[in-house]
Image (cartoon, helix red, strand yellow):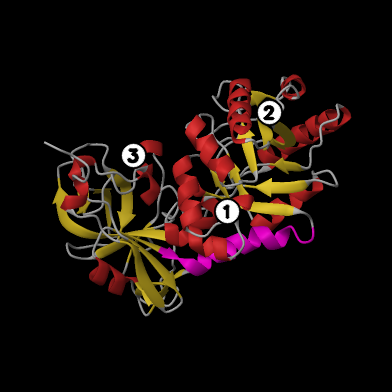
Amino acid sequence: MFHYSNGNLYCEQVDLDAIARAAGTPCYVYSGQSILDAYHAYDDAFGEMPHLVCYSVKANSTLAVLSLLARAGCGFDIVSGGELYRVLKAGGDPARVVFSGVGKTAREMELALENGILNFNCESEAELAELDAIARKLGVTARFSLRVNPDVDAATHPYIGTGLRDHKFGIGIDEAPGVYRRAKAFRHLQARGVDCHIGSQIVDYSSILEAAGKVAELIEILRRDGHAIDHVDLGGGLGIAYRPGDNAPDIRDFVSALRMRTSAGLTIVVEPGRSITGPAGVLLTRVLYRKKTPSKEFVIVDAAMNDLIRPALYRAHHDILPLHRASGAPVVGNVGADIVADVVGPVCETGDFLARDRELPDIQPGEYLAVSSAGAYGFVQSSNYNSRPRAPEVLVEGSRWRIVRERESYEDLIKGEST
């Protein structure tokens, strides 16, 4: 949905330069059509097979994004009470919500039960006991799945892998039958599924299929033990192409492979996040200065690590494109580079960079750049470090665009504080 036309970079039918000048920079911009296309790629690929696509809210929790998906019929995967609050405010159906996460509080469980969510993905026996106590207090029965850890390496960044035995997530898959058996003692819990999520930014989904095979074997054991398992939640984690020339996994091929590994009579739940919103967003930024030292050249921009922390946190690559390029040049890749420079921001940290040793055109102060594939884990991880107001967010739908989150003011920075 991002393309050059007559040398200008567009999102759908909107010139990004017009947004940058009107909304200011830094600024996040999302393509509504890209988000919907990715959701429907998942949903349509399942066909008539019982399924539920639950968008992973932690990837991008902006109300306008959630509302767009809710109107399309999407469910939601949440990891906090705040995310549930956002989903409800955006018009999401609580009966299509699953609650994941290793540290749910009693108040969060209560809020979820009061709103009638579909299912809890539980990660310890202590959590099961707490959930049973809350459900008993409210006089309801809570549906749950155990998140099992299959000890499968997702071959991703160590900070976002979640499926190995030394990770904090889940219960060892060999221990699961005993935990399900003991959970029968909880009168206000009902075991209805099995959950497994091994990590994020997975570009070779054979690891997910390996985990799915192990989960299928577990479900057969649980059914023989008399548990009424009716769904399997195989998480999310499908990666996207961040670098020019990278091949992102095909969503339809991935879903087809999952279907082949799932027993008849089960509803499949998936929790995609990055693969829905990641490619749909860019971070617009303006060049402030050029600086050259004996060993380095720097392009200093007005976006910083507080706006997009992924490069500093994960050494993540984001392609950086000028908003103006010679007509006919390709959309991806810095073809015809004139300089090699670090793209850095104003934050007072050496780790404040968006790119290092990046080939770029001869971009000058006052010109604009787009940091690509920033729609997931971008704004949602932004902060006010260095007392910098957080950026606005813009949603583009066809030829129209609108600000869906205003830029924070200095007054917003001190809201709730006292001297």
Q: What residue sits 51% from the left and 30% below the top?
A: 106
**Outermost left residue:** 419
Secondary element type, mark 2: loop
Q: What residue sits 25% from the left and 44% below the top?
A: 384
Q: What residue sits 85% from the left and 32% below the top?
A: 223
- CB contact under 8 Å: marks 1 and 3: no
The image quadrant of residue 336 is bottom left
Q: Which residue is mark 2?
A: 150
Q: Which residue is mark 1?
A: 248
Q: Earlier in the sequence, mark 3 or mark 2?
A: 2
Q: Which residue is mark 3?
A: 312
In the image, residue 272 above or below residue 107: below
Q: What residue sits 63% from the left and 42% below the top?
A: 235
Q: CA distance from mark 1 to mark 3?
A: 23 Å
Q: Amino acid at mark 2?
A: Pro
Q: Amino acid at mark 1?
A: Ala
